[in-house]
Image (cartoon, grey):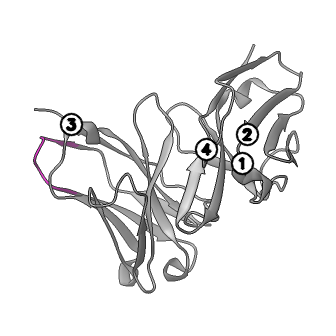
Amino acid sequence: SYELTQPSSVSVSPGQTARITCSGDVLAKKYARWFQQKPGQAPVLVIYKDSERPSGIPERFSGSSSGTTVTLTISGAQVEDEADYYCYSAADNNRAVFGTGTKVTVL
Amino acid sequence: EVRLVQSGAEVKKPGESLKISCQGSGYNFANYWIGWVRQVPGKGLEWMGIIYPDDSDTRYSPSFQGQVTISADKSINTAYLQWSSLKASDSAMYYCARGGFIAPDYWGQGTLVTLSS
């Protein structure tokens, strides 16, 4: 199936580590991306090619992959990291899917 | 600096037509796929389709094939999303994003479309 499943919510205390998983068969063969979306704002790319970080994204954001699951880790989460996070993968330029989304709460 | 600037919010009635736009700058617009993503309030992200401005090669997600039309004018670095007859279910935020299905990276600020009878 061409679906990406994420937990609906993750809570973390400031300074602690948040981990968000994303599972789907396509991830065994294709790279994943992660997008952060704060309320009222457009999504922002935070991870590409499973674990690469675009310029300007803080080092506390990292990604990893194992089999059919990818993980976004926020090490030392900050209050400003509260947002929805979506994983993403594309088989080719005819088929792509966003994950179901995870709301991260930092409190 | 790469920027995608979208047209402003719209309030329309069911059955009306609509065309919204996304203008790119800071990169070679013609040679990057650009597409449209729908987000219903409080819900997730859905790809609608993509276009390659240089030759207008267009791909639609199955859910949106026949429901919308995506086009681009490379002479003015602008992509478009249009409806011929809006439905109440078209109320949503619409984003453009550079990079197509394979490598979306930069996003526009979004255009809110509200349907009201």
Drawn side of residue B20 relative to residue A88, left or right: left
Earlier along the polypeptide chain: callout 2 or callout 4? 4
Earlier along the polypeptide chain: callout 4 or callout 1? 4
Q: Nearer the viewer, mark 1 or mark 3?
A: 1
Q: Secondary structure at mark 3?
A: helix
Residue A47 percent location from the top left of the image: 76, 51
Q: Nearer the viewer, mark 3 or mark 4?
A: 4
Q: CA distance from mark 3 to mark 2?
A: 33 Å
The magenta stretch spans which residues? B11-18
Does the image show residue A55?
no
Q: Are marks 3 and 4 on the same chain?
A: no
Give the residue pinned by disc 4. Answer: A3
Which amino acid type is marked by label 1? Asp
Q: Secondary structure at mark 4?
A: loop
Report the quarter where the C terminus of chain A lies. top right
Marked residue chain, label 3:
B
Compare residues A31 and B8 and report the one nearer the observer: A31
Q: CA distance from mark 4 to mark 1?
A: 8 Å
Give the residue pinned by disc 1. Answer: A25
Marked residue chain, label 1:
A
Residue A58 percent location from the top left of the image: 82, 44
Q: Of the numbered discs in the image, which one, if any, rests on residue A23? A: 2
Q: Nearer the viewer, mark 3 or mark 2?
A: 2
